[in-house]
Amino acid sequence: RDLVMASGQIDKTYQTATVDYSHQLPAGNGYGYRVRADAADYRGIDAGIYAQNNLGGYLAEFSRRLGTTSWRLGETGSIVWFHAKLIPTRWLSDSFGVVDVPQSGIKVLANNQYIASTGRRGIVILPQLIPYSQNAVRIDDEGVPIDLQINLEEKQIVPMPRTGVYVKFSAAKVKGALLILTTEDGIPVPLGAEVRSATGQCGRSRPARRSFRPGDRVARTSTRDMERSSM
Protein backbone atom coordinates (compact mmCIF):
# COMPACT_ATOMS: atom_id res chain seq x y z
CA ARG A 1 0.00 0.00 0.00
CA ASP A 2 1.25 3.48 -0.90
CA LEU A 3 0.76 6.47 1.39
CA VAL A 4 1.39 10.18 0.73
CA MET A 5 1.26 12.85 3.44
CA ALA A 6 1.96 16.59 3.36
CA SER A 7 2.17 19.02 6.26
CA GLY A 8 3.41 22.50 7.06
CA GLN A 9 3.96 24.88 9.94
CA ILE A 10 4.36 28.65 9.97
CA ASP A 11 4.88 30.90 12.96
CA LYS A 12 6.95 33.96 13.85
CA THR A 13 10.23 32.08 14.31
CA TYR A 14 9.88 28.81 12.38
CA GLN A 15 8.64 27.72 8.97
CA THR A 16 8.63 24.25 7.46
CA ALA A 17 6.90 22.17 4.82
CA THR A 18 7.11 18.35 4.69
CA VAL A 19 6.11 15.72 2.15
CA ASP A 20 6.20 11.99 3.02
CA TYR A 21 5.80 9.15 0.55
CA SER A 22 5.94 5.50 1.63
CA HIS A 23 5.37 2.07 0.16
CA GLN A 24 4.62 -0.31 3.02
CA LEU A 25 6.17 -3.72 3.47
CA PRO A 26 3.85 -6.63 2.59
CA ALA A 27 2.91 -9.28 5.15
CA GLY A 28 5.03 -11.80 3.27
CA ASN A 29 8.31 -11.61 1.42
CA GLY A 30 8.89 -8.33 -0.35
CA TYR A 31 10.16 -4.80 0.04
CA GLY A 32 9.04 -1.30 0.99
CA TYR A 33 10.52 2.20 1.00
CA ARG A 34 9.93 5.75 2.19
CA VAL A 35 11.05 9.25 1.25
CA ARG A 36 10.64 12.42 3.30
CA ALA A 37 11.56 15.88 2.09
CA ASP A 38 11.55 19.05 4.21
CA ALA A 39 11.75 22.61 2.93
CA ALA A 40 12.08 26.10 4.43
CA ASP A 41 14.01 26.41 7.74
CA TYR A 42 14.56 22.67 8.29
CA ARG A 43 15.60 21.74 4.79
CA GLY A 44 16.66 18.13 4.19
CA ILE A 45 15.77 14.70 2.91
CA ASP A 46 15.41 11.26 4.49
CA ALA A 47 15.03 7.99 2.60
CA GLY A 48 14.98 4.32 3.43
CA ILE A 49 14.44 0.97 1.78
CA TYR A 50 13.33 -2.16 3.63
CA ALA A 51 13.08 -5.82 2.63
CA GLN A 52 12.19 -9.14 4.24
CA ASN A 53 12.30 -12.80 3.27
CA ASN A 54 12.30 -16.20 4.97
CA LEU A 55 15.68 -15.50 6.58
CA GLY A 56 15.17 -12.06 8.11
CA GLY A 57 14.62 -8.34 7.58
CA TYR A 58 16.99 -5.76 6.10
CA LEU A 59 17.12 -1.98 5.95
CA ALA A 60 19.20 0.82 4.44
CA GLU A 61 18.54 4.43 5.45
CA PHE A 62 20.03 7.73 4.28
CA SER A 63 19.64 11.26 5.62
CA ARG A 64 21.00 14.66 4.64
CA ARG A 65 19.95 17.63 6.73
CA LEU A 66 21.47 21.03 7.47
CA GLY A 67 24.71 20.07 5.74
CA THR A 68 25.14 16.78 7.60
CA THR A 69 24.92 13.37 5.92
CA SER A 70 24.28 10.08 7.73
CA TRP A 71 23.36 6.56 6.77
CA ARG A 72 22.47 3.31 8.49
CA LEU A 73 22.38 -0.37 7.53
CA GLY A 74 20.61 -3.00 9.58
CA GLU A 75 19.54 -6.63 9.68
CA THR A 76 17.18 -8.44 12.04
CA GLY A 77 16.30 -12.10 12.37
CA SER A 78 15.72 -15.03 14.67
CA ILE A 79 16.74 -18.67 14.91
CA VAL A 80 14.26 -21.42 15.80
CA TRP A 81 15.43 -24.76 17.18
CA PHE A 82 12.88 -27.30 15.97
CA HIS A 83 13.14 -31.12 15.75
CA ALA A 84 16.93 -30.93 16.00
CA LYS A 85 17.05 -28.35 13.21
CA LEU A 86 18.16 -24.71 13.27
CA ILE A 87 15.78 -22.59 11.18
CA PRO A 88 16.72 -18.95 10.45
CA THR A 89 13.70 -16.69 10.06
CA ARG A 90 12.42 -13.13 10.50
CA TRP A 91 12.40 -11.35 13.82
CA LEU A 92 9.97 -13.09 16.20
CA SER A 93 8.45 -10.81 18.80
CA ASP A 94 5.22 -12.68 19.52
CA SER A 95 3.36 -15.86 18.58
CA PHE A 96 4.46 -17.79 15.52
CA GLY A 97 3.78 -20.99 13.64
CA VAL A 98 6.04 -23.71 12.25
CA VAL A 99 4.49 -25.16 9.09
CA ASP A 100 5.77 -28.51 7.83
CA VAL A 101 4.99 -29.58 4.27
CA PRO A 102 7.17 -32.35 2.75
CA GLN A 103 7.77 -30.32 -0.40
CA SER A 104 9.77 -27.16 -1.16
CA GLY A 105 8.35 -24.11 -2.92
CA ILE A 106 4.80 -24.41 -1.53
CA LYS A 107 3.12 -21.07 -0.74
CA VAL A 108 1.75 -20.78 2.80
CA LEU A 109 -0.92 -18.27 3.83
CA ALA A 110 -1.90 -17.08 7.31
CA ASN A 111 -5.21 -15.28 7.79
CA ASN A 112 -5.60 -15.11 3.99
CA GLN A 113 -2.27 -13.33 3.48
CA TYR A 114 0.67 -14.90 1.69
CA ILE A 115 3.58 -15.11 4.13
CA ALA A 116 6.31 -17.26 2.60
CA SER A 117 7.08 -20.44 0.66
CA THR A 118 8.51 -23.61 2.13
CA GLY A 119 12.28 -24.02 1.91
CA ARG A 120 14.27 -27.00 0.72
CA ARG A 121 13.38 -28.91 3.93
CA GLY A 122 9.66 -28.19 3.48
CA ILE A 123 9.48 -25.94 6.57
CA VAL A 124 8.45 -22.31 6.86
CA ILE A 125 7.97 -20.01 9.86
CA LEU A 126 4.84 -17.85 10.15
CA PRO A 127 5.65 -14.80 12.31
CA GLN A 128 3.23 -12.34 13.92
CA LEU A 129 0.31 -14.66 14.59
CA ILE A 130 -2.43 -13.31 16.83
CA PRO A 131 -2.35 -14.86 20.34
CA TYR A 132 -5.54 -16.13 22.01
CA SER A 133 -7.33 -15.95 18.63
CA GLN A 134 -7.98 -18.36 15.82
CA ASN A 135 -5.47 -18.01 12.99
CA ALA A 136 -6.32 -19.61 9.66
CA VAL A 137 -3.37 -21.41 8.05
CA ARG A 138 -3.58 -22.94 4.60
CA ILE A 139 -1.45 -23.68 1.59
CA ASP A 140 -1.97 -22.42 -1.94
CA ASP A 141 -2.69 -25.28 -4.34
CA GLU A 142 -1.29 -23.24 -7.22
CA GLY A 143 2.18 -24.52 -7.93
CA VAL A 144 1.69 -27.87 -6.18
CA PRO A 145 3.31 -30.55 -8.38
CA ILE A 146 0.87 -32.85 -10.14
CA ASP A 147 2.56 -35.91 -8.64
CA LEU A 148 2.01 -34.66 -5.07
CA GLN A 149 -1.22 -35.53 -3.26
CA ILE A 150 -1.50 -33.03 -0.43
CA ASN A 151 -4.02 -32.20 2.28
CA LEU A 152 -5.37 -28.74 1.35
CA GLU A 153 -7.74 -28.43 4.31
CA GLU A 154 -7.43 -25.11 6.14
CA LYS A 155 -6.22 -25.40 9.74
CA GLN A 156 -7.25 -23.19 12.65
CA ILE A 157 -4.65 -22.65 15.38
CA VAL A 158 -4.80 -20.63 18.62
CA PRO A 159 -1.28 -19.85 19.86
CA MET A 160 -0.35 -18.62 23.30
CA PRO A 161 1.63 -15.36 23.61
CA ARG A 162 5.30 -15.62 22.58
CA THR A 163 5.01 -19.32 21.75
CA GLY A 164 5.14 -21.40 18.58
CA VAL A 165 2.58 -23.83 17.16
CA TYR A 166 3.47 -26.78 14.94
CA VAL A 167 1.26 -27.21 11.86
CA LYS A 168 1.65 -30.35 9.73
CA PHE A 169 0.21 -30.79 6.23
CA SER A 170 0.40 -34.40 5.11
CA ALA A 171 1.46 -35.17 1.57
CA ALA A 172 2.37 -38.19 -0.50
CA LYS A 173 3.93 -38.77 -3.89
CA VAL A 174 1.62 -40.29 -6.49
CA LYS A 175 2.07 -41.49 -10.03
CA GLY A 176 0.13 -39.71 -12.76
CA ALA A 177 -0.11 -39.62 -16.52
CA LEU A 178 -0.53 -36.93 -19.14
CA LEU A 179 -2.88 -38.14 -21.89
CA ILE A 180 -3.63 -36.63 -25.29
CA LEU A 181 -6.90 -37.81 -26.84
CA THR A 182 -6.60 -38.33 -30.59
CA THR A 183 -8.69 -39.83 -33.37
CA GLU A 184 -7.63 -42.92 -35.30
CA ASP A 185 -5.90 -40.60 -37.78
CA GLY A 186 -3.70 -39.14 -35.03
CA ILE A 187 -5.55 -35.80 -34.93
CA PRO A 188 -6.19 -34.34 -31.42
CA VAL A 189 -9.85 -34.53 -30.41
CA PRO A 190 -11.28 -31.01 -30.88
CA LEU A 191 -12.57 -29.04 -27.96
CA GLY A 192 -16.30 -29.65 -27.42
CA ALA A 193 -16.46 -32.85 -29.50
CA GLU A 194 -18.83 -35.56 -28.27
CA VAL A 195 -17.17 -38.80 -27.23
CA ARG A 196 -18.75 -42.13 -26.40
CA SER A 197 -17.26 -44.69 -24.06
CA ALA A 198 -17.29 -48.44 -24.56
CA THR A 199 -20.24 -48.66 -22.15
CA GLY A 200 -22.31 -46.26 -24.23
CA GLN A 201 -21.91 -43.17 -22.05
CA CYS A 202 -21.66 -39.96 -24.06
CA GLY A 203 -20.10 -36.64 -23.11
CA ARG A 204 -18.19 -33.69 -24.47
CA SER A 205 -14.42 -33.64 -24.59
CA ARG A 206 -12.34 -31.13 -22.64
CA PRO A 207 -9.16 -29.55 -23.97
CA ALA A 208 -6.95 -32.05 -25.80
CA ARG A 209 -4.42 -32.20 -22.94
CA ARG A 210 -5.55 -33.21 -19.50
CA SER A 211 -3.72 -34.43 -16.40
CA PHE A 212 -4.95 -37.58 -14.70
CA ARG A 213 -4.38 -38.81 -11.17
CA PRO A 214 -5.11 -42.19 -9.58
CA GLY A 215 -8.84 -42.83 -9.45
CA ASP A 216 -9.66 -40.99 -12.72
CA ARG A 217 -11.43 -43.12 -15.34
CA VAL A 218 -10.46 -42.69 -18.98
CA ALA A 219 -13.03 -43.58 -21.61
CA ARG A 220 -11.99 -45.04 -24.94
CA THR A 221 -13.12 -43.18 -28.04
CA SER A 222 -12.84 -43.58 -31.76
CA THR A 223 -13.69 -41.67 -34.93
CA ARG A 224 -16.72 -43.91 -35.51
CA ASP A 225 -18.10 -43.15 -32.07
CA MET A 226 -17.78 -39.40 -32.73
CA GLU A 227 -19.42 -39.64 -36.12
CA ARG A 228 -22.27 -41.75 -34.74
CA SER A 229 -22.91 -39.20 -31.96
CA SER A 230 -23.10 -36.32 -34.43
CA MET A 231 -25.70 -37.99 -36.64
Image (tube, rainbow, N blue to C red):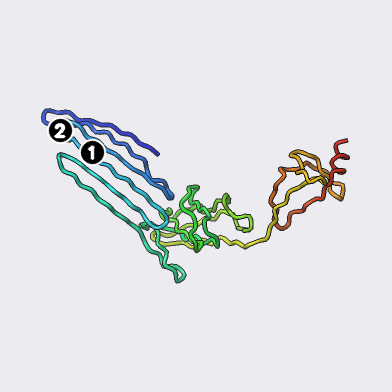
Dot 1: element: strand
The N terminus sits in image quarter: top left
Q: Is residue 192 left or right of residue 50?
A: right
Kindly indicate the quadrant of the structure image that contains residue 16: top left
The residue at 35%/53% (across/down) is 57
Spot occupied by residue 178 in the image (x, y as percentages of width and height): 70, 53
**Disc ID at residue 108:** none
Element type at marker 2? Answer: loop
Q: Residue furthest left?
A: 13
Residue type at tag 1:
Ile
Residue on which the image places disc 2 = 41
Q: Nearer the viewer, residue 90 or 179?
A: 179
Number of numbered tags placed on the structure image = 2
The amino acid sitting under disc 2 is Asp
Mark 1 lies on residue: 45
User: Residue 139: image x %, image y %?
Assistant: 54, 53
Q: Residues within 10 Å of mark 2 (few under 14, many from 20)?
A: few
Residue shown at 31%/41% (left/top)? 34
Foreground: disc 2 or disc 1: 1
Residue 148 rendering spot, x and y as whole percentages? 62, 58
Name the quadrant of the C terminus. top right
